[in-house]
Image (spheres, rainbow, N blue to C red):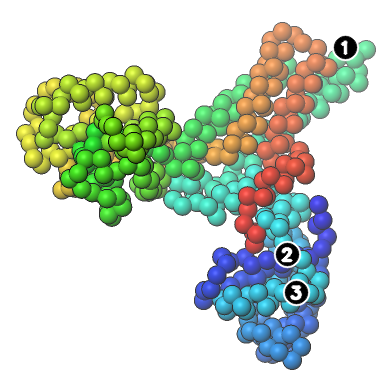
Amino acid sequence: MITNDNIIALATPSGAGAIAVIRISGKDAITLCEPFFKSIKGKKLSLQKSHTIHLGHIIDGQRTIDEVLVSIFKGPNSYTGENVIEISCHGSTYIQQEIIQLFLRNGCRMAEAGEFTLRAFLNAKIDLSQAEAVADLISSDNAASHQIAMQQMRGGFSNEIQKLREELLNFASLIELELDFAEEDVEFADRSQFQDLVSKIQHVLKRLIDSFAVGNVIKNGIPVAIVGAPNVGKSTLLNALLNEERAIVSDIAGTTRDTIEDELTIQGIGFRFIDTAGIRETKDVVESIGIKKTFEKIEQAQVVIYLFDASHFQENSNLIIVEIEKIRNKFPQKPLIIIANKIDTVQTKTLTSQLHYEHLLLLSAKQNIGVDALKDKLLAFVNTGALRNNETIVTNTRHYDALLKALEEIEKVQHGLNSGLSGDLLAIDIRQALYHFGEITGQVTSDDLLGNIFANFCIGK
């Protein structure tokens, strides 16, 4: 892992635009840039203060490539902890490549994915969980995922873990000290205080582990499968939710042969709606494949919406009830919302008298009646209390796995304390718990782990 050279990359999205930002980081970043930057006021970059911006031209010999703004950030007070230059140029792809190629020929190499943030981590500007939050912030596409990423990037999660680790480390040190005085039979670590600390750590770890259920759906969106017989209005409902003509709507049964997916943000929470092929007996090979996919999508979904046509309820009531029970029996753990669609065409008393389901909604997708009630119902399935209270929410699978392992080791420590286990045996489990805490914040790392994490970043970050 080479970290003492100079790296360059485009920090803004590739393609033409109004401006582009090219970032250089390394101990020689400023002196490398200086010969190729001609300030309009004749300034030397190496003599300028950190966190200043300078107008001038990037030149290659006698040729002027572009008029630019050059920002200077001197280490260690920069994002990477090294000297950093950011060149804001015009957004022509030709200009971008000309500037990058100029510096590649003169002491820079192309940055790898996430290498700027990797250097920030290696130079102790941020810890590992904060570095991962940078990637989450870049990919956040709704208010909730943005809020969680910001909280973690500011160190909310890592501060909580670090505090627990320090308290546990203090007791671990006292227990290790006891081992040095084993012959004197003394106790430096107060066992009752240690019991209280272990209980506290267990409580915090369990809360963080439980938060992953919410964090995961907020980060990745909540998949919602819309199912029902053909021509009951599933595609119309999808269009009404998205407020656009996303799915083909027709009076011909079986129009949707494959699943159609799109996303909607409701009060900051992302939902991924899946319009499936209608469920019915069919000899059409293509349609039957679509129906098979429907059940696969129900398996993947976290919420299921079953839609039926209220205008044909009387003649199909038995079939509707059978299909509802089939879904409930096959997927008992999944929330099921039952929707009577096209209620603008019928009297609803018969429906409510025959169907006694907890999550029953009356709706007209075509007339946009009851769509807001459906959105409220979907939001009710998401526990947003922790989000509203700005509590720490775990969204990262790696963190979740480390927390589970840390809890397992802490429970071993708890059992050891209750059993009167000797200090040397307690110390083994405490060390393992500390190891898993360190995995989260980056105090324990490997090149493979860092490679896997930063490979998911974009090049310029």
Residue type, numbered disc 1? Asp
Which residue occupies the foreground of this view, 20 or 42? 20
The residue under label 2 is 110
Where is residue 452? Give x, y as percent. Answer: 69, 44
User: What's the residue at 38%, 46% (across, down)?
Assistant: 261
The circle on residue 266 is: none
Looking at the image, which residue is at 60% across and 28% down?
Answer: 205
Tell which circle, 3 or 2, labels the residue nearer the N-terminal end.
3
Give the Cα distance between marks 1 and 2.
60 Å
Front disc: 3 or 1: 3
Which amino acid does the dot numbered 2 rest on? Met
Image disc number at residue 185: 1
Which of the two residues, 233 or 68, is positioned nearer the viewer here? 233
Rendered location of residue 105, percent (x, y): 78, 74
**CB under 8 Å between discs 3 and 2:** no
Could you tell me which secondary element the residue under label 3 belongs to? Answer: helix
Distance from label 3 to label 1 (Cα)? 66 Å
Q: Residue at x 46, y 52 (%)?
A: 141
Any part of residue 196 in sight:
no
- Name the residue tied to disc 3: 103
